[in-house]
Image (spheres, rainbow, N blue to C red):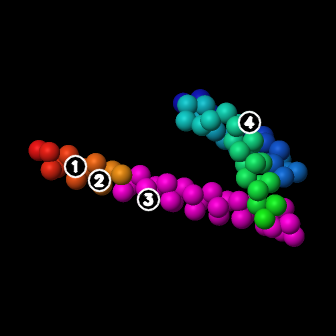
Amino acid sequence: MSEQSITLLIAGRHYRLKATAENNPAPEHIKAELERRLSIVAEQSPLASRDQLLVLTAVNLLAELLQQQQLQQQQLDTLLATIRQAV
């Protein structure tokens, strides 16, 4: 696994990240998606500071991730139940 160090400018700050090319999307895609989501949160919370916007965006992303994981687990459980009934 080749590890690379990347620097992203997000919300006016430079962030240095380590990433492996094999299992991460392109850094510019990550930056673009984060900037898009930050813009949405900034519109919803116009008085929030940059740090607050970053935290709110992180919380929203984690909530989405947990929701997706729950949905995938439900789908897996349904699939396993179907397979067990078939055998």
Which mark lies nearer to you, 1 or 3?
A: 1
Q: Where is residue 72 in the image (x, y as percent from the top left)?
A: 41, 52
Q: Is residue 57 left or right of residue 1?
A: right
Crowd tier of the residue under label 2, counting other residues whose Cα lies within 10 Å: few below 14, some 14–19, many 20 or above: few
Q: Which quadrant, please, contains the C terminus? A: top left
In the rendered structure, which segment of residues is drawn in magenta?
A: 45-74
Categorize mark 1 by other alpha carbons within 10 Å: few (<14), some (14-19), many (20+).
few
- The three-letter amino acid code for the residue at tag 1 is Thr
Q: Name the residue under label 4.
A: 28
- N-term mark: 3 or 2: 3
Q: Nearer the viewer, residue 78 or 66?
A: 78
Q: In this view, does 70 lie to the left or right of 31?
A: left
Q: In the image, what residue type sits under mark 2?
A: Thr
First in sequence, mark 3 or 4: give its number.
Answer: 4
Q: Are discs 1 and 3 less than 8 Å apart at CB? A: no
Callout 3 environment at 10 Å: few (<14), some (14 to 19), or many (20+)? few
